[in-house]
Image (cartoon, rainbow, N blue to C red):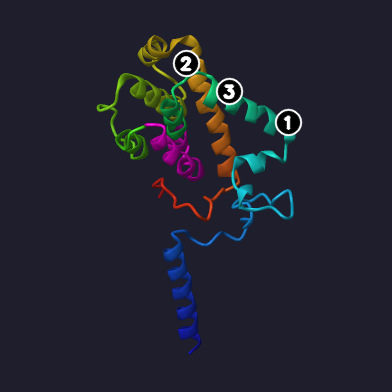
Amino acid sequence: MRSLHTLTALLLVVGATLVSGQAPLPKDIDSKTGNRFPAIKPDAQPDSFGPGAIRQYSPPVAESMTAVNDYLRRKSGLEPRLVELAILVTAREMDCQYVWTAHEPPALKAGLQQEIIDIVKFRRPLTKLGDKETVIVQMGRDVIRTHKVASDTFARAVKLFGHRGVVDIVSLMGDYAATTMLLNVADQHVRPKDTPLLPIP
């Protein structure tokens, strides 16, 4: 009889997980933040999820990273769809579910086609991409995977974006690489209302 109760309880947990689309949180994850860091404020709401809340543990880091992120995303002059592409490439190469799930919908809204998103998401060949998209994805894949970028890829990037543009694009990737490292260390889970969008085994 006891094993029947145990089985029933297990089935209820599995059923609840399937309905919600997410697995129950591990024991070391704070339910208010969705990660290993407790909320700084005891009355924290679910908007405590994500890198902004984690960075609050180090206010100088929060201040400087917020300013850099704001410039790179909104003031550098890079097209919004290409900003989102650079972020998605970084999230994919760093296997960061939180960043990917947070940025795929805005990428679509910014005009990045689902076909391009899927090439990044499923690590497909770049044969169907335009020149700008190809260079951004190739640079991101190369610098994160092998820590090197080929001379011809760099030359194409400079031709398309100029030296300042290349610095801004790579800095944007670096900004999100730092963010994904922080989130991955914290084992950040997506917000309860979100369905994970990145296929990570």
- Residue at image mark 1: 60
Q: Nearer the viewer, mark 3 or mark 1?
A: 3
| Residue 4 part of the magenta-drawn span | no
Image disc number at residue 16: none
Q: CA distance from mark 1 to mark 2?
A: 27 Å
Q: CA distance from mark 2 to mark 3?
A: 14 Å
Which span of residues is magenta-colored? 90-111
- Where in the figure is residue 15, as x and y percent of width and height? 43, 70
* Residue found at x 42% / y 13%: 161
What's the amino acid at mark 3?
Tyr
Count neighbours of disc 3 (C-alpha within 10 A) and say few if under 14, some if 14 to 19, many if 20 or more. some
* Residue found at x 64% / y 29%: 65
Count neighbours of disc 1 (C-alpha within 10 A) and say few if under 14, some if 14 to 19, many if 20 or more. few
- Residue at image mark 2: 166
Instruction: Determine whether the residue tagged by mark 1 lies in a helix, strand or loop.
Output: helix
- Residue at image mark 3: 71
Front in this rendered view, residue 80 or 31: 80
